[in-house]
């Protein structure tokens, strides 16, 4: 399978490229805007993959970049500014498409605008294949079970250890701060400052999570009969740091750019704070939890991970191997493959640092 990894000069893109190289079975092309960084990455990979440079806004350059490719993995955001030309080039060149976007408006636009054309051309488009998005979608499917009875509500909550949260890239922080809608009754309404308590799996605990719209709100209603999907984020639940964080960010996380500025100004302080064992769960930095409410009963499924960033790369590697048997068109994570089988296989093959998976019915 010939795979172009666009944005391979960035953090997530480089992890994706390294993971695909390590797994084997892929012929890679490293692509992006910064040739120097791409060449530096190439020098670390045994296969010495080809490097191609293209501006993400230049449709013709992107089409040249995609020549000979079976699939493009797009790892360079912000997608709402840099994504459309790549999608059009993928259609024109007959390439399957994956991205790791967390921008729900962009992901929604793919389902609305590209579903039919991708299907007609025999292509599979898989937007939002990152750890926050895939796990929420998969876990919601597992919690819902095989029943097709209507669901009252789906809530997906993600927990970060303080260290991982503090060292999110400024771009990720600013992107999260710009989110402003949530899905209710198939309508995207302005997000309100909503706090909710969740019991996250060990070594996290009970903590406050805040409403932060994500791609789960787009994907889950496409395969589960639910009128309401809400996403939440918590930092260090089960520790005193959670209360401090929740208080500070109650107003829909609008202070996130201030946090980015503080990280830049005081890297040593934040590094020391993030490494404090008193507030960072040992060996675990990320958890995902789905709660499906049906007939006043709540069904839950949860997973914990040691490294959310590496998990995104592992998810992409796993997803690419499912591509030959995948449906055509724009599809969700749960439509790509069976979620229960996917989690079990990823755990058994140690493709993820999967420490715990549980479901209560």
Image: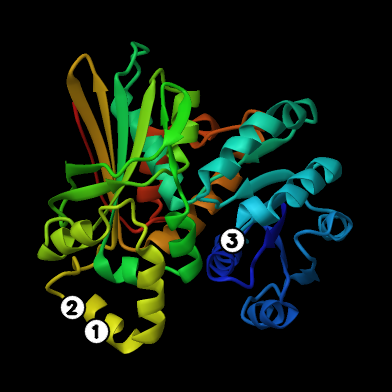
Image quadrant where one finds the C terminus: top left
Residue 53, image quadrant: bottom right
Q: Which is nearer the eye, 86 or 285?
A: 86
Mark pair 2, 1: CA separation = 6 Å
Q: Secondary structure at mark 3?
A: helix
Q: Secondary structure at mark 2?
A: loop
Mark pair 2, 3: CA separation = 33 Å
Asked which colour scheme the image uses, the reply is rainbow
* Residue furthest out toward the top: 149
* Cβ–Cβ under 8 Å for marks 2 and 1: yes
Which residue is disc 2 drawn over?
Answer: 276
* Cβ–Cβ under 8 Å for marks 2 and 3: no
Which residue is disc 3 drawn over?
Answer: 20
User: Residue visible at 81% across and 55% down?
Assistant: 66
Q: Position of residue 140 (x, y in %)?
A: 35, 32
Q: Residues within 10 Å of mark 2 (few under 14, many from 20)?
A: few
Instruction: Please determine whether, in this image, residue 237 is positioned above or below residue 90.
Output: below
User: Residue visible at 27% across and 58% down?
Assistant: 249
User: Residue visible at 35% across and 41% down?
Assistant: 231
Q: Residues within 10 Å of mark 3 (few under 14, many from 20)?
A: many
| Discs 3/1, front | 1
Q: Position of residue 314 (x, y in %)?
A: 48, 56
Of callouts 3 and 1, which one flags the residue occurring earlier in the amino acid sequence? 3
Which residue is disc 1 drawn over?
Answer: 272
User: Residue visible at 39% across and 20% down?
Assistant: 227
Mark pair 3, 1: CA separation = 33 Å
Query: Is residue 147 toward the left or the right of residue 108 in the image?
Result: left
Q: Secondary structure at mark 1?
A: helix
Q: Which is nearer the eye, 1 or 102?
A: 102
């Amino acid at each position: 399978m010939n795979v172009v990894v666009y944005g391979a000069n960035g953090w997530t893109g480089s992890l994706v490229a390294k993971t695909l190289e390590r797994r084997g079975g892929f012929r890679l092309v490293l692509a992006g805007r910064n040739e120097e960084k791409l060449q530096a990455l190439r020098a670390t990979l045994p296969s010495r993959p080809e490097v191609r440079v293209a501006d993400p806004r230049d449709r013709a350059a992107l089409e040249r970049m995609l020549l000979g490719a079976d699939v493009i993995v797009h790892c360079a955001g912000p997608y709402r500014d840099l994504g459309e030309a790549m999608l059009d080039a993928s259609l024109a060149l007959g390439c399957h498409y994956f991205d790791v976007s967390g921008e729900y408006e962009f992901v929604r636009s793919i389902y609305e605008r590209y579903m039919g054309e991708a299907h007609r051309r025999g292509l599979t488009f898989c937007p939002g294949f990152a750890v926050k998005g895939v796990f929420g979608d998969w876990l919601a499917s597992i919690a819902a079970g095989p029943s097709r009875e209507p669901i009252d509500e789906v809530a997906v909550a993600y927990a970060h250890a303080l260290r991982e949260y503090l060292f999110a890239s400024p771009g990720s922080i600013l992107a999260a701060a710009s989110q402003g809608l949530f899905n209710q009754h198939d309508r995207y309404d302005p997000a309100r400052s909503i706090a909710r308590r969740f019991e996250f799996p060990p070594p996290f605990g009970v903590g406050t999570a805040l409403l932060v719209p994500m791609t789960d709100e787009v994907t889950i209603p496409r395969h589960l009969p639910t009128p309401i999907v809400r996403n939440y984020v918590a930092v260090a639940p089960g520790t005193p740091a959670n209360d401090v964080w929740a208080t500070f960010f109650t107003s829909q996380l609008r202070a996130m750019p201030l946090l980015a500025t503080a990280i830049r100004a005081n890297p040593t302080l934040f590094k020391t704070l993030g490494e404090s064992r008193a507030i960072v769960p040992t060996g675990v930095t990320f958890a995902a939890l789905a709660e499906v409410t049906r007939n006043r009963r709540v069904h839950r499924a949860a997973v914990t991970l040691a490294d959310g960033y590496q998990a995104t790369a592992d998810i992409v590697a796993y997803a690419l191997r499912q591509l030959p048997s995948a449906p055509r068109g724009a599809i969700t994570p749960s439509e790509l493959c069976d979620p229960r089988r996917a989690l079990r296989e990823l755990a058994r093959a140690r493709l993820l640092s999967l420490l715990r998976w549980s479901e209560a019915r």
